[in-house]
Amino acid sequence: MKLYQQQLSLPAKRRGFHLITTEILRAMPQLAGIQAGICQVFIQHTSASLTINENADPTVRVDFETWFNKAVPENDPDFLHNDEGPDDMPAHLKASILGTQVLIPVRNGRLALGTWQGIYLCEHRDHGGSRNILITAWGE
Amino acid sequence: MKLYQQQLSLPAKRRGFHLITTEILRAMPQLAGIQAGICQVFIQHTSASLTINENADPTVRVDFETWFNKAVPENDPDFLHNDEGPDDMPAHLKASILGTQVLIPVRNGRLALGTWQGIYLCEHRDHGGSRNILITAWGE
Amino acid sequence: MKLYQQQLSLPAKRRGFHLITTEILRAMPQLAGIQAGICQVFIQHTSASLTINENADPTVRVDFETWFNKAVPENDPDFLHNDEGPDDMPAHLKASILGTQVLIPVRNGRLALGTWQGIYLCEHRDHGGSRNILITAWGE
């Protein structure tokens, strides 16, 4: 079994949900040599996250931002951790609801995503800066 | 280290939460030959998801549907993505909250689930149709 | 490729969010021998969960408990599964929102966590008792 690991630094993106499937594929060309295996994409932050969802209609990604802002409101007077601004504590919560990683099967040298699946970078801060990603793929 | 990969098509299920542990085990008999390892179950869709939860009392699964319908309401006037019906955008959101995959240790030829743990297929659409699953297991 | 698996029983913790990174590292000293790989931490329960979030300011963990208690309220009259007390069904829901496992890359013999990332045990019951963890690490 082979295992590959690659670091990737994504430039700063505005708050919201962004398709990054192309960037991930470009950073891990070794996927082409894996007939059956797995690929993990991991984000090394606590106020941004990764998820898999619809890759076609961009309004889906807008609606993600709309719903998450209602579900995890800013300026909750019960929050104690608010030194870094109103977007900080909600960002930590959204990051754990969605998760720090996606894990995708590899089949015939490609990510075995469904037709409509893409990888989202979920930027929960107003000014999150660049984000560090670590990609690990293994298989035969 | 050995690695096995199996496709599984699950027939259409009604909207809600369904135990599928038995179907997963039946589709991957090679687990019996893994002394220590991992098994991933991945769903290739963006409006259905997978999670691990209580395998005994069926009312837990009913309460999951109840809570998720309140937390991610249909017909939110702020949603932009609503061409496919009121259950569509909530289905995408529920799918990302719960996730597209479960990842379970394998020990002595069996999934090392806790006593009360089972695998749920979470069908978030009113008429979701059949669902494609990809199972990957590896270990020694 | 090497694969290691370790069981770990964590003593009972009070309801809330607890940093357990140190306990995980202590239970899996074999990480030091993995140059590139992955480590999974899996919890064998349905009313406690695992996530990755901020490892520094303890008020983040207090705010997690605050938000989750509002988002998944106890004593919802629509819940059917309430024989084990008002904290029971919310615990199942919180466990699936956060998930039963975390999966972390390994690099140069260490967990490749970001600077501010730590592993949380999320205890959703008032009296959850000890919790069984299974750690699996593999790589080269």
Image: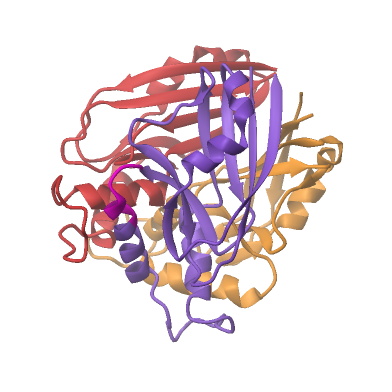
Chain colours: A red, B orange, C purple
Residue drawn where x is 60% and y is 46% of the image: C42
| Residue B104 placement (x, y as % from top left) | 66, 45
Q: In which quadrant of the rendered image does the N terminus of chain A lie?
A: top right
In the image, is B24 to the left or to the right of B54?
A: right
Residue drawn where x is 60% and y is 61% of the image: C130
Residue in the foreground of this view, choosing between C48 and C128: C128
Q: In which quadrant of the rendered image does the C terminus of chain A lie?
A: top right
Q: Which region is colored magenta?
A: C55-61
Residue in the foreground of this view, choosing between C40 and A128: C40
Q: Can you say whether A5 is above or below C132 in the image?
A: above
Place residue A138 in its image quadrant.
Answer: top right
In the image, is B138 to the left or to the right of B44?
A: right
Q: Can you say whether C127 is above or below C36 in the image?
A: below
| Residue B63 placement (x, y as % from top left) | 52, 75
| Residue B43 placement (x, y as % from top left) | 59, 45
Residue drawn where x is 77% and y is 42% of the image: B107
Q: Is residue A100 visible?
A: yes
Place residue B80 in its image quadrant.
Answer: bottom left
Q: How many marks?
A: 0
C53 in magenta: no
In the image, is B41 to the left or to the right of A5?
A: right
| Residue B3 placement (x, y as % from top left) | 74, 28
Q: Is residue A112 visible?
A: no
Q: Can you say whether C66 is above or below C56 in the image?
A: below
Residue drawn where x is 62% and y is 13% of the image: A33
